[in-house]
Amino acid sequence: MCFDSEVLENFLDAPYDPLPEFEGPPNYQLHRRGRGKDHPRYGRFVYALARHYQPERIVEIGTFAGGTAVGFGRALTENGAGQLICVDQDSYSRGTFPEVAQRNLERVGVPESQFRLCCGDSKQWLPKLGREFPGQIDLLLVDGDHTYEGALADLRNSLPLMRPGGLVLVHDVDRRRRMDEATDEHPHPVYEAFHAVAAEHQLDWCILKFIRKHLGVLRTPEQACKSIRLAA
Ligand SMILES: C[S@@+](CC[C@H](N)C(=O)[O-])C[C@H]1O[C@@H](n2cnc3c(N)ncnc32)[C@H](O)[C@@H]1O
């Protein structure tokens, strides 16, 4: 799978950090997770993608404090159009989503009309969004539940939302890192789920290793794919 070379040019030209005054989760100093390690290259790359593809609608599963959301959000603001829908159940650090994510999106200048924050489990939200926006999502990021079953469900539930040729981005498609969610059966849970879904639907894919913890990308077919059906 190939990207337009302009995406990489945009990435190199993009601001180093989409939001230098980013607010971390409430107990960020103590919390070992956060945007610190993943950012700014991760947020900068999604910014470059959204600037290039000028998406009408983006869905993000797993927003936390908004490390990637501010990248998408800044791009939509500069594009002057497009909506960002974020889904998170606030299970990592209570009080982070939607509160901190909302403040970061406002700080980066995204008007309220251009973002929507959905609180709760992606297993419930994705089928709902699938009914609201069937085949209408241009970019979708999966960075929520990192168990094999959770990532598989998010990926399978995401496909009916996608516009033909749309991109599904998947963080942590990395088999060199031991993940907390690893099991004997699934030692590399997100990596395995990513490849299972790519094979199931014969999707084009690539893995961008310059994004820390590796960003997998699936491209949905230009022709409607018979195996992709909206969840009941
Ligand atoms: C790794 S963080 C996301 C990081 C974010 N993309 C960033 O750039 O900072 C994962 C997030 O997914 C959320 N999450 C985990 N399981 C979820 C589920 N089943 N439904 C919705 N959100 C979930 C957690 O609450 C957490 O905020």
Image: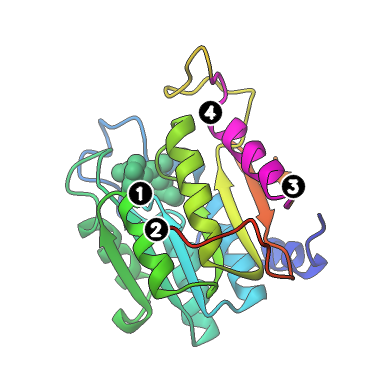
Q: CA distance from mark 1 to mark 2?
A: 6 Å
In front: label 2 or label 3: 2
The residue wearing badge 1 is 123
Q: Position of residue 55 (x, y in %)?
A: 57, 76
First in sequence: mark 1 vs mark 4: 1
- Which residue is at 23% across, 49% downward? 96
What are the residue bounds of the magenta stretch?
186-203
The residue wearing badge 3 is 206
User: For this rendering, which residue is in front, 137 or 79?
Assistant: 137
Q: Is mark 1 within 8 Å of ligand 1?
A: yes
In front: label 1 or label 4: 1
Element marked by disc 1: helix
Q: CA distance from mark 3 to mark 4?
A: 17 Å
First in sequence: mark 1 vs mark 3: 1
User: For this rendering, which residue is in front, 130 or 187?
Assistant: 130
Q: Position of residue 35 (x, y in %)?
A: 41, 45
Q: Are marks 1 and 3 in contact (CB under 8 Å)?
A: no
The quadrant the C terminus occupies is bottom left
Element marked by disc 3: strand
Of the numbered discs in the image, which one, if any, rests on residue 126? 2
The amino acid pointed to by label 1 is: Lys
Q: Position of residue 194 (x, y in %)?
A: 61, 40
Q: Are marks 1 and 2 in contact (CB under 8 Å)?
A: yes
**Apparent side of residue 88 relative to residue 44 in the rendered image (left or right):** left
Q: CA distance from mark 2 to mark 3?
A: 23 Å
User: For this rendering, which residue is in front, 151 or 54?
Assistant: 151
